[in-house]
Image: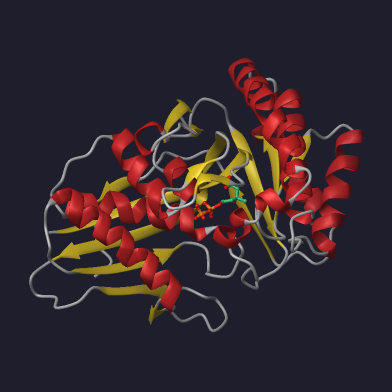
Amino acid sequence: MKKTAVAPSNIAFIKYWGKADEALRIPANSSISMNLSGAYTTTTVDFSTAYTKDEVSYIDTSDMDKLTRQREFGYEERKRVIEQLDRIRKSAHINTCAKVMTQNTFPKGTGIASSASGFAALTVAGFAAAEASLNEKELTIFARMGSGSACRSIPDGYVFWEKGDSSDTSYAYSLYPHGYWDLRDIVCVVDLKEKKVSTTEGHQRVETSPLWGWRHRSVDGRIEAMKRALAEKNFTSLGGLIEEDCLEMHHVMQTQAPPLYYWNETTVVLMENATSWRNRGLPVYFTIDAGPNVHLICEEKSEKHVLEQVKTISGIESVIVNKPSAGAHLVESHLY
Ligand code: DP6
């Protein structure tokens, strides 16, 4: 059967960095995220005896030449997709090959994590195409095995990924639906190159950082405080905790061996400016994932003012304004 799913990317307010179980992608700590309306992946999966091997490709929407083309994935990416198809086949008791086609709304190489939306869309479309009906919790567990952060792209809106202590207990669920609080994530894309060190590789070296033990002990308290800030819609408290967790994760990254420096000059300029805009009365906070792009988090009422300030900064390649979004879901129209 052929099925298509759409899944949003997500921005982590509390970061997932470090794994308790490498193979199963069980994280060292729980995390909290918001799904993003402006950055998502559409994936069509067709399991059929017509295919003699798995065919995996993506539609390249790179705006370099304003053309869209069908392209093959590189070796590593293709291998990860096929491993996920194997998990789906095993669970659904089928052995047919599949054709997978995928497309992102954001060009590959904008530095926005495509593995979260990509593995969420692949998991939802794949199980539907294999005619296996899984509930949301089960889908998040399978998405997690493809890429940890992908489990947070399946439930609606504001999402909690419970770290758990086994595959069955490490899953994601919605804390609040996307309509709960009209926040914005204004992504300032400052570098179009793909990251040099993959997150999967980075996670593996987390224990080499002397700050790792500190993070491990502090993150649970921050999670509880963030849950309270979300429940009370206390933006000042939420924003402070978002920045604190981002900086803590990057300090761990930067003190790993070898160190991981994801920021560039414009990243730092934006971090400094977010702080001074805030000191001048504009409530905006930054967060950064495994790349140089800066996510500016604000409430809807401040969006216009933040965008005006962003225009004054040089070195920004593009800006993507995101609202909170629904999670992964099936759609009727297919990519092929
Ligand atoms: C910095 O989910 O990409 O974005 O499980 O190895 O695929 P794998 O890692 P991935 O790690 C995401 C790390 C992060 C923080 C976050 O999204 O929580």
Left/right of residue 108 with respect to residue 313 in the rendered view: left
- 251 or 301, which is in the foreground? 251
Residue at point 56%, 35% (across, down): 31
Q: Position of residue 218 (x, y in %)?
A: 72, 29
Q: Where is residue 80 in the image (x, y as percent from the top left)?
A: 39, 65
Q: Position of residue 188 (x, y in %)?
A: 70, 56
Residue positioned most to the bottom:
65
Any part of residue 332 in sight: no
Any part of residue 63 in sight: yes
Marks counted in the figure total: 0
Left/right of residue 145 with respect to residue 195 in the rendered view: left
Residue at point 9%, 75% (across, down): 50
Residue positioned most to the left:
49
Does residue 158 sit above or below 41 in this rendering?
above
Residue at point 52%, 63% (across, down): 106
- Image quadrant containing the N terminus: bottom left
Residue 219 figure quarter:
top right
Residue 153 figure quarter:
top left
